[in-house]
Amino acid sequence: METPELTPRQAQLLGYIVKEHIRTAAPVASRALVEYYQLEVSPATVRNEMARLEELGYLMQPHTSAGRVPTENGFRYFVERLMEEPQLPLAEQRRIAHQFYQARDHMDEWLPLAASVLASATRNAALVTPPLATTASYRHVELISTHGRAVLLVLALEGGVVKQQALVLPAYLPQNVLSDIADRLNQLCNGLTAAGILKRLQELAPLERDFAQLVLGLMDEAQGLPSDAVYRQGLSQLLQEPEFVEGEELSQGVIQVLEEQSLLQAVIADALSPTLGIGGMRILIGGEGRWDSLRACSVLLTRYGVANYATGALGVVGPVRMAYGRAISVLRFVADVLSELTCEAFNPGERELATSRFAVDLDEPL
């Protein structure tokens, strides 16, 4: 369906109405627009244009005597054609970067930190998923004798993914033999993908090769395995927005989306198609007719990480009248920081070569 074209004045008025509704959470009246923006036209002229915007599907009138509020199409037109994306202030960039700099060596810390930063900076709910390796790469293996012929195989992959498998061997092997086998595998396989390990299997002794086959099986399982971890933050402050305070059904819908793991993952997977590259932004406004629980919300989602290597998702969930420009600028900056962290986590040798976003005047007082 084609988007109806607007005259310059209609587009300007729509932009003002969206901004006012975002600011006040209330219907916008023609006289308020004329006074607030010092328009050089009469309230009657503005009302006529608002009526035309209503006919085109960009505005609606909640009550006969009320002003207008933007529809989903009105918000979408604003986001796609009228919105200016503000640059995140340098002081705020430095403050955010400094927090991540302190946690850069600990993935278990910087993922929840990202959710907290996004929620605080946008005053909405936030979500972050861990980076997932597109292709699993070997990092380290341990073989631990537990009891008799029982052995625990612990495989660590690049990026922090750990897989375990309990084994019962045909014959008992002492710990020193198991450790020698693990050392040999670590020496030969470090940094290799499954395909790379397959090419080197003939360099291994028969017993080492048997364990390497088990490792390959675990790597196949890990490759492309979606993470069930989603870090969330900010639901309580989102529910304080007028839409959700006054509408119990709407608040229950957003709670369901953010708390029900399978539904949240379905929304993320549906919105972030593989064709959306790193830094691309997906904006769902009002659930877009597919997610009834999100009809009072907008969801901004983007990918972070290293394209074709390891990527995760992060997003912001807010009311349909969220401050889109501000939210998008924060989301982009945090995604850039997480991309650098992911690059370092999956490519430790490139730590000093990565774009030094963390070095932005960190020595200056915050």
Image (cartoon, grey):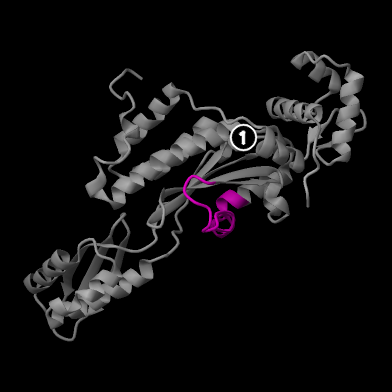
| Mark 1 closeness class: few <14, some 14–19, many ≥20 residues within 10 Å | many
**Residue at position x 44%, y 38% from top?**
334
Residue 362 to residue 225: above or below: above
**Magenta segment:** 257-280
Q: Which corner quadrant of the image does residue 243 belong to? A: top right
Q: Which corner quadrant of the image does residue 9 belong to? A: top right
**Residue at position x 40%, y 53% from top?**
131
Residue 71 to residue 17: above or below: below
Residue 288 to residue 209: above or below: above
Residue 171 in picture, x, y percent from top left: 14, 85
Q: Nearer the viewer, residue 245 or 309?
A: 309
Q: Residue beneath label 1, please?
A: 324
**Residue at position x 20%, y 76% from top?**
211
Residue 133 in picture, x, y percent from top left: 37, 59
Secondary-structure class at tag 1 = helix
Residue 9 to residue 258: above or below: above
Q: Which corner quadrant of the image does residue 84 belong to? A: top right
Q: Nearer the viewer, residue 252 or 179?
A: 179
